[in-house]
Amino acid sequence: MEFLGLEHISIGMLALLFCVALVAGFVDAVAGGGGLIALPALLYTGISPLQALATNKLQGSFGTFASTLKFIRHGHIDLKQMLPAVFLTFAGAATGTFAVQLFSTDFLRLFMPVALVAMVLFFALQPKLGEQDRHHRIGIWVFAALFGFTLGFYDGFFGPGTGSFFTLAFVLMLGFNLVKATANTKLLNFTSNITSLAIFIIGGHVVWSLGLVMAVGQFAGGFLGAHMTIRHGASLIRPLVIIMSSAMALKLLYDNFSA
């Protein structure tokens, strides 16, 4: 395990990481994409990409836990209904986390910007999408197998856009409104985060001193983001999903062409 001593990190850097995590937790609770904010900050500290990915899972787990707890307390998550999706998301995330330590993610870097742009256009051209519950198109076990396992694997293996993809799947396949979809997305995000984190801990890749400082900011940001989501609903979620998905697509495209 990597415990990188705090004496090697300035107070200013720790304060910056805390603030970054606070913002990332808020954004992630509403629309996903918190990793787009947190990962560059972690890499800026000089740790390796694998350590940054592992440490991001540590701090991100606190944010998704806080938002999930808030959504559960307000009745937006039915834990019994979601058990199949939780189970298969766990299985997918474990498989993906093992795979990322063995294989390259280059092919996903090429494909994912296209998928993210398509999702942005879909949300932008469907202004009424997710305003209210609709009839589900598939059952929960089919949803769990098609999206829980697949997106859990993706989150463990690569990650950008997982929350947005889960939210869209909930709206289109299970007919959830955007608040309910966002709430249940946080439950599955927490599942994949904590699963990946456990495997990264076993591998000794987590930088605890950085991750725990950011975890405090993430917890506060996740709780606040969930509160604002419950209060403002689709009027807050939709524009942030479009903004964050666009930002992720541009970031991936930039990385592809600058490599």
Image (tube, rainbow, N blue to C red):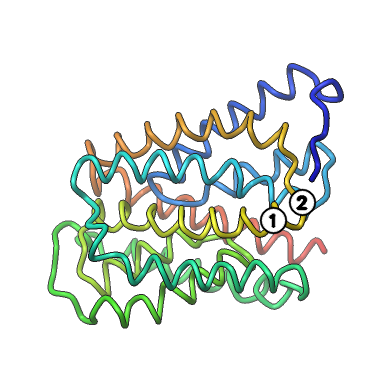
Circle 2 SS class: loop
- Residue furthest out toward the front: 202
- Residue furthest out toward the top: 11
Residue drawn at x 43%, y 43% is 65
Foreground residue, 115 or 137?
A: 137
Circle 1 SS class: helix
x then y, percent, for residue 165: 43, 66
| Above or below 229: residue 86 | below
Q: Quadrant of the N terminus?
A: top right
Quarter of image, res 131:
bottom left
Identity of the amino acid at label 1?
A: Phe
Report which residue position mark 2 lands on: 205
| Distance CA(mark 2)–CA(mark 1) | 6 Å
Residue drawn at x 81%, y 24% is 9
Quarter of image, res 184:
bottom left
Q: Which of the marked residues, 2 or 1, is nearer the chain's N terminus?
A: 1
Query: Which numbered marker is on residue 200?
Result: 1
Identity of the amino acid at label 2?
A: His
Residue drawn at x 57%, y 56% is 248
Left or right, residue 103 beside residue 178: right
Left or right, residue 49 beside residue 97: right
